Amino acid sequence: MPDLDRLVRYCNAAPACRALVQLAQDVSAPLYLVGGAVRDLLLGRPLRDWDFAGRTAMEFARKFAEAQSSKVIMLHEDQPTARVPVGQGEGGCTLLDFCDLRADGIESDLAARDFSINAIAYDLAEPELIDPLGGVDDIRAGIIRALGHDNLHADPLRCLRAYRLAAELGFTIAERTREWIRALAPELSEVAGQRIGDELYKLLYPPRVSETIAMMDQDGVLAVILPELEEGRGMPQPSLHHLDVRAHSLAAVTEMEKLIIDPTGALPGSHDELEEYLTRTEVPPLLLMAALLHDIGKPRCFTREAGGRIRFKGHGKVGAAMVREMLRRFAWPAEVRRTVAAFTQHHLRPLELAGRGQDGVIEQEHSEQFVTMSAIRRLFREVEPHELGLVVLAIADSRAATGPAATPQHQTEVEFILDDMLHRYLAYQQQQAREPLLTGQDLIAAGYQPGPLFSEMLRAVEDARTDGEVRTKQQALELARRVAQDHGIPPR
């Protein structure tokens, strides 16, 4: 049997698993490799974490930890589950999880799991492949099939996991499974936010993000886990747009995913830097979530002026506060929350600098002198070190708006200016290896006491230096004195 041979090969090649095989044979007790680990090995996917189940799994964990000079970390007491970390150094740490069987036997245990592709076991001692529910056939067919309505109801998070697996594996969700998910979607509101956040974060890796989110939207899942998006349904927009606020946000995700997969033609002046940025592991979820939420504050800022003009004044700031709260609900890391909120707050500023207002009009001709370097620096300072990400978000946002005012010529001009802004900024950064014109020590020597004002004084000097307004240390000190005087500190 090819599948069994493949598992035997993989398990014998992995030192930790090979040791467990020997241990299972020595004690003459069954121990099973289960769940996603079996699925991924059958698919030939890399595996760092291993899941095992058995009647005496906790005893296996203890003996294995002793043999590996490791430790047993109890994850759950009610349903006994333990973790044993092994290996360090360049290869990283491998995590082996051990869980007592949740039913009378392995087949009953598998029947209580979520999907057929996760309900396959490999008996280490025999060796034997145990597949009572057709999981191997579903893996071959690329189908995610829930084992039953009650299996999903037992843990509603499984409804969201179906979409995450579809995006991750490129599989299709069986129609009957989608019917059950539609019926159970409201129950996701009872699931802990951190569990929702973990699945959602894993889902946000191309190349199938936008189509997966579209399926979640069709099945009522998106509205449950991100109810704030529903506020934009039916919300009209200015002539730059052809979609309401909510639909535009989904379109921005599509455009963002296209840019991440293939940035060819975007930002030619900084192409190498852009390609390197987009390959960073942490970047796709940041950009795709920012694309989805960038206009989340618009419905709460909607106004219609006497002449009929629609405005969303301050929606970036309002949206940023909403994003911080939403991502805190998901227990995403603080730095991720900060970055997505900063993208949300400042997403419109690159387009405003490029001359594209809310109505999609290019208000000034592009040129290298159109946007000052100090203005560019003030903008990018808000999102460091994700300056490239903010520009990519602006492009995705702009490409997702194709209303009457958004002509192809306007889009081309906007992207030209954005590219020029970024290219100049990156060139400026390379020049920053030079000595600063003014330092904190210079300010102390001039008689100023260290404090928060130092940063503002030094920033004003650097901005003026960038724009060619300050060239000497004496000029820099004069400017610093004016800044201090503006804050009520007399000249020194």
Image (cartoon, grey):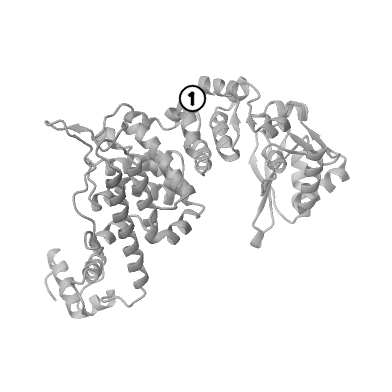
Query: Up-down: is 184 above or below 309?
Result: above
Quarter of the N terminus within the rendering: top right
Q: Position of residue 214 (x, y in %)?
A: 46, 31
Q: Residues within 10 Å of mark 1 (few under 14, many from 20)?
A: some
Q: Position of residue 333 (x, y in %)?
A: 46, 48
Q: Amino acid at mark 1?
A: Asp
Query: Up-down: is 244 above or below 454?
Result: above
Give 214 or 261, whichever is nearer the viewer.
Answer: 261
Q: Residue at x 30, y 46 (%)?
A: 411
Q: Residue at x 42, y 40 (%)?
A: 253
Which residue is label 1 attached to?
Answer: 219
Asked whether the viewer can see residue 102, the reply is no
Rendered image quadrant of residue 7: top right
Rendered image quadrant of residue 97: top right
Asked whether the viewer can see residue 422, the reply is yes
| SS assignment at label 1 | loop
Q: Residue at x 55, y 38 (%)?
A: 167
The residue furthest front is 409
Q: Position of residue 179 (x, y in %)?
A: 55, 20
Give 29 or 344, whichever is nearer the viewer.
Answer: 344
Give 361 or 479, whichever is nearer the viewer.
Answer: 361
Q: Position of residue 80 (x, y in %)?
A: 68, 36
Count of number-bearing discs: 1
Quarter of the C terminus within the rendering: bottom left
Residue 468 lies left or right of residue 74; in this view the side is: left
